[in-house]
Amino acid sequence: MKKKRWRLLAAVLALAMVMGMAAGCSGKGESEKKTADSGKKGDDPKAFTIGFPWQTSSTDPTFVSIENNVRVAVEAAGGEIVVVESDLSADDLINNVSDLISRGVDGIIMMPASDSMLATANQMCSDAGVYFGTMFRTINDEEIKKEVMILILCRRMQRGR
């Protein structure tokens, strides 16, 4: 059960990242927010919540499109999205991660402001048992890149790959 949930969450995070990258090529940033047909998290044992710190006050069509794409991906996979307002600075994102963890989300998708915040976010999420993924970020700091690669390899070994 836990392994299936992990795989589903990984698939949603990957889909959200791909859809987010395609958002920059989309046309108008029209927003049609659909409500999920499924019940709340407690009604379905496969349901999950994804936290998404984002600059929701932005009217930039790309930002609006990215938020809509992440929402659609999460809801299509049977999850619920929890969007929190963020100015996307490192300090604000750390506060957002803490807030989302306290709200009990199963995973967090974020666009980190800097390499240096990744270690803190990783530690917070690991301690809380919350998965997280990043988007639109190339890790330039070699020490942090090494830490992330070790984490990825350890998780793959735990899954038997």
Image: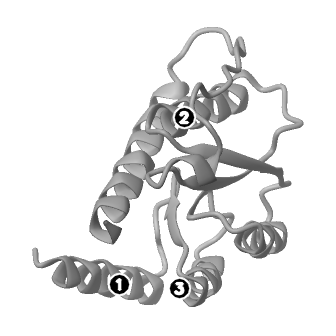
Q: Nearer the viewer, residue 114 or 14?
A: 14
Q: Nearer the viewer, mark 2 or mark 3?
A: 2
* Color style of the picture: one colour
Q: Position of residue 53 (x, y in %)?
A: 73, 54
Residue for badge 2 = 75
Q: Are circles 3 and 1 on residues that touch, CB within 8 Å?
A: no
Camera-near label (3 vs 1) is 3
How far apart are labels 3 and 1 at the CA level? 11 Å
In primary-sequence order, the first of circles 3 and 1 is 3
Quadrant housing the C terminus:
bottom left
Foreground tag (2 vs 1): 2
Residue 6 placement (x, y as % from top left): 35, 64
Above or below, 94 relative to 127: above
Q: Amino acid at mark 2?
A: Glu
Residue 22 x, y percent position in the rendering:
45, 28
> Which residue is rendered at x = 69% and y = 68% of the image?
104
Instruction: Check disc 2: other Cα within 10 Å, few if <14, some if 14-19, many if 20+.
Output: many
Does dot 3 land on a helix, a strand or a loop?
helix
Question: Residue, x 72% and y 70% (percent of image)?
Answer: 97
Of residue 2 and residue 50, the one placed in the foreground of this image is 2
Q: Which residue is mark 1?
A: 151
* Residue at x-position 34% and y-position 70%: 2
| Three-letter code, disc 1 | Leu
Q: Percent x, y for residue 134?
A: 52, 60
Bin the neighbour count of mark 1 within 10 Å (Cα to Cα): few under 14, some 14-19, many 20 and up.
few
Q: Is residue 53 left or right of residue 91?
A: left
Q: Which residue is mark 3?
A: 126
Left or right: residue 140 versus residue 99 is left
Within the image, what quadrant is residue 39 found in?
top right
Q: Amino acid at mark 3?
A: Ser
